[in-house]
């Protein structure tokens, strides 16, 4: 079952004023409703089929692997396992998307919780399968892989076998699996439902988190400050709960890491991402070294535009002082993104257009709706769905471009099947960030004057800083939290201190972090749902910057090679995928090349200031 993760880069999707006539998704391609007879049949069939699978294969894989038809026998078992994963993933995708549409609805919440419990119980019968595959010795498995049908699954088998050093005895694995519903899963759900239920008092108006965060991008400084104060007040009132959730989940992870033998707090994430720790370390070091010439330099420039030495934290994402206010209706956003995609590849635009035409997008802001934005792949036999909270800012257009990039990627990878379509997080951001870049360049080309061009460049630089600098700061924050948690619980004050330290280092002296900002760690969903996910944003942004430079150099056959990268899904390592473009993330120069794109955009802004 593939995860549904909020992919907005700053914890919430940027947005603006009220919008009407926005599309809402139709989940009927999954199931018509929680009472759909097809859903009941799929659950019943999955339960009986998983038990039959366990009876047929548990304790027998080694014998099959050493038999005369080893390859064919193992391939047949994997196909049955994959079919079960497909059905279970379909059910959980429906439950998760339905819940995301209104997390405050107790009926939906109960259905979501019930499905989690049922699917955990069903999948417990399948847990033995990858564990037993990993007990087959290398020579025997390699001999079996001579069979073409089994060799089709080689990438998945190799990924499973990378887990061998960290897997536990079967009954311990089963225990970890079953208590996930009352452990991590329960705390994740508590966080989500609490966050969507919070209300923030802004000048006498009671607002949910999305519109409150949106006010931080309003031209009126008083509105921005009022929103920041409201956020700090409500986060502060709930800080005890968020601190408890953070401590509990960090301890939960520490227990799992200790039992499995992960020495580094982020080791399990690196393994899941199929990325070498030294590659991540090189990325982090490169970004951290670049703070002064990227974020520090840009925010000092922005402060000068405001006539100040430093900006308050509620001004960080404010529009430029002379920036004309412009709302973008959804029809214009659709045209803008599809036209940008069309110029790159008609095939890419055709896939993206289906999201609009076939009811795969949910765009309005609604009470109880999950904040932020995401593209959820569901399962290969259906299609992805995109959730937005669209309110009409130009940055909302970029969010749409980002999520449609994910969607196109997921559609293209789907033929790899339920086991091999999922892409490691470090590569999952490739198409989304590339889609943003295509859309940005198209908008920049249409800019009529220096004021509009400066606004466009500044917005892009800020998005890239949020994607690269801010996410690496988030990663460093998580590392400190999880490292200190090994020695005992952290107080709210201590978490706030760590947050302020990493934010001050990354944002620089031109951003003044005032009272209340020490609570802003509490709303970032990535810390809860997917520890250490955040560096994947910086990885993806730098990767795409390098890719886009190859594209701009008119590399022959770029579009075809790019589509091959997306179609590969999870079947290839980042080194294999980047090789056709002459790129290697293992080279230190790779990260410098990506970061230099941001630096050049700031150069352009300084040049505009001088004219």
Image (tube, rainbow, N blue to C red):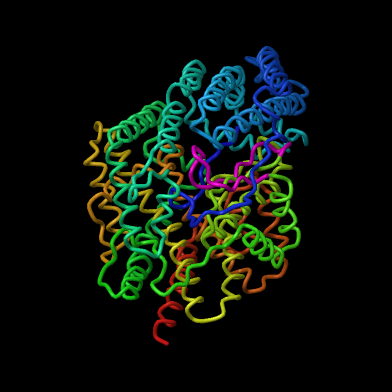
Image quarter of the C terminus:
bottom left
Dominant secondary structure, magenta: loop
- What is the magenta range? 360-382
Residue at the spot 70% in from the left edge and 28% down from the top edge: 78
Left or right placement of residue 355 versus residue 596 in this view: right
Left or right placement of residue 324 versus residue 507 in this view: right
Q: Is residue 485 above or below residue 610?
A: above
- Front in this rendered view, residue 503 or 112: 112
- Front in this rendered view, residue 144 or 157: 157
- Front in this rendered view, residue 50 or 320: 320
Check if residue 14 falls in the magenta segment. no
Q: Is residue 565 above or below residue 367?
A: below
Residue 243, quarter of the rendered image? top left
Does residue 448 appear anywhere in the picture?
A: yes
Residue at the spot 32% in from the left edge and 38% down from the top edge: 482
- Front in this rendered view, residue 107 or 299: 107
Q: Residue furthest top?
A: 55
Q: Is residue 179 above or below residue 582?
A: above
Q: Is residue 214 above or below residue 602?
A: above
Does residue 66 appear anywhere in the picture?
A: no
Q: How many circles with numbers are drawn on the protein? A: 0
Q: Residue furthest front?
A: 204
Check if residue 375 falls in the magenta segment. yes
Point out residue 129 in the picture as x, y percentages from the top left corner: 62, 22
Point out residue 398 in the picture as x, y percentages from the top left corner: 55, 60
């Amino acid at each position: 079952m593939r995860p549904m993760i909020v992919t907005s880069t700053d914890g919430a999707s940027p947005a603006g004023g009220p919008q009407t006539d926005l599309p809402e998704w139709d989940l009927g391609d999954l199931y018509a409703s929680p009472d759909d007879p097809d859903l009941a049949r799929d659950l019943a069939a999955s339960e009986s089929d998983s038990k039959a699978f366990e009876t047929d294969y548990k304790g027998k894989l080694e014998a099959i692997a050493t038999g005369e038809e080893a390859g064919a026998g193992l391939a047949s078992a994997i196909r049955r396992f994959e079919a079960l994963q497909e059905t279970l993933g379909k059910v959980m995708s429906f439950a998760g998307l339905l819940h995301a549409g209104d997390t405050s609805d107790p009926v939906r919440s109960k259905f979501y919780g019930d499905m989690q419990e049922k699917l955990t119980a069903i999948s417990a019968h399948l847990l033995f399968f990858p564990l037993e595959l990993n007990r087959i010795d290398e020579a025997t498995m390699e001999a079996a892989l001579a069979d073409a049908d089994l060799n089709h699954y080689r990438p998945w088998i190799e990924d499973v076998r990378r887990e061998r050093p960290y897997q536990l005895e079967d009954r311990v694995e089963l225990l970890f699996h079953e208590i996930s519903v009352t452990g991590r899963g329960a705390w994740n759900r508590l966080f989500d439902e609490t966050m969507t239920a919070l209300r923030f008092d802004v000048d006498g108006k009671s607002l949910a988190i999305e519109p409150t965060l949106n006010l931080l991008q309003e031209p009126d400084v008083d509105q921005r400050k009022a929103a920041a104060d409201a956020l700090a007040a409500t986060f502060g009132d709930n800080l005890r709960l968020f601190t408890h959730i953070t401590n509990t989940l960090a301890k939960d992870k520490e227990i799992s890491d200790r039992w499995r033998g992960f020495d580094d707090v982020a080791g399990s994430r690196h393994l899941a991402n199929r990325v070498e720790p030294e590659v991540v370390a090189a990325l982090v070091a490169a970004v951290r070294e670049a703070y002064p010439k990227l974020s520090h330099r840009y925010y000092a420039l922005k402060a000068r535009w405001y006539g100040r030495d430093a900006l308050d934290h509620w001004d960080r994402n404010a529009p430029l002082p002379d920036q004309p206010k412009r709302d973008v209706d959804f029809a214009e956003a659709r045209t803008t993104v599809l036209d940008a995609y069309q110029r790159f590849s008609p095939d890419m635009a055709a896939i993206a257009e289906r999201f609009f035409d076939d009811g795969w997008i949910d765009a309005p802001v609604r009470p109880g709706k999950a904040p932020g934005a995401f593209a959820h792949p569901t399962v290969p036999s259906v299609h992805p769905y995109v959730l937005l909270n669209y309110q009409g800012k130009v940055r909302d257009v970029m969010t749409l471009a980002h999520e449609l990039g994910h969607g196109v990627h997921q559609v293209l990878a789907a033929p790899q099947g339920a086991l091999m379509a999922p892409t490691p997080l470090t590569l999952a951001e490739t198409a989304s960030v590339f889609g943003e870049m295509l859309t940005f360049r198209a908008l920049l080309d249409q800019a009529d004057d220096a004021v509009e061009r400066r606004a466009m460049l500044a917005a892009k630089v800020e998005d890239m800083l949020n994607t690269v600098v801010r996410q690496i700061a988030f990663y460093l924050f998580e590392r400190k939290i999880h490292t200190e948690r090994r020695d005992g619980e952290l107080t709210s004050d201590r978490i706030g201190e760590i947050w302020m330290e990493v934010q001050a280092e990354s944002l620089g002296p031109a951003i003044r972090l005032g009272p209340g900002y020490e609570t802003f760690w509490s709303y970032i969903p990535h810390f809860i749902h997917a520890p250490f996910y955040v560096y994947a944003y910086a990885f993806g942004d730098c990767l795409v910057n390098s890719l886009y430079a190859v594209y701009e150099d008119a590399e022959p056959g770029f579009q075809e090679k790019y589509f091959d990268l997306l179609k590969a899904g999870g079947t290839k390592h980042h080194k294999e995928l980047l090789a056709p473009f002459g790129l290697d993330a293992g080279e230190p120069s790779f990260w410098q090349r990506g970061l230099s794109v941001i630096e050049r955009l700031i150069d352009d802004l300084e040049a505009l200031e001088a004219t």
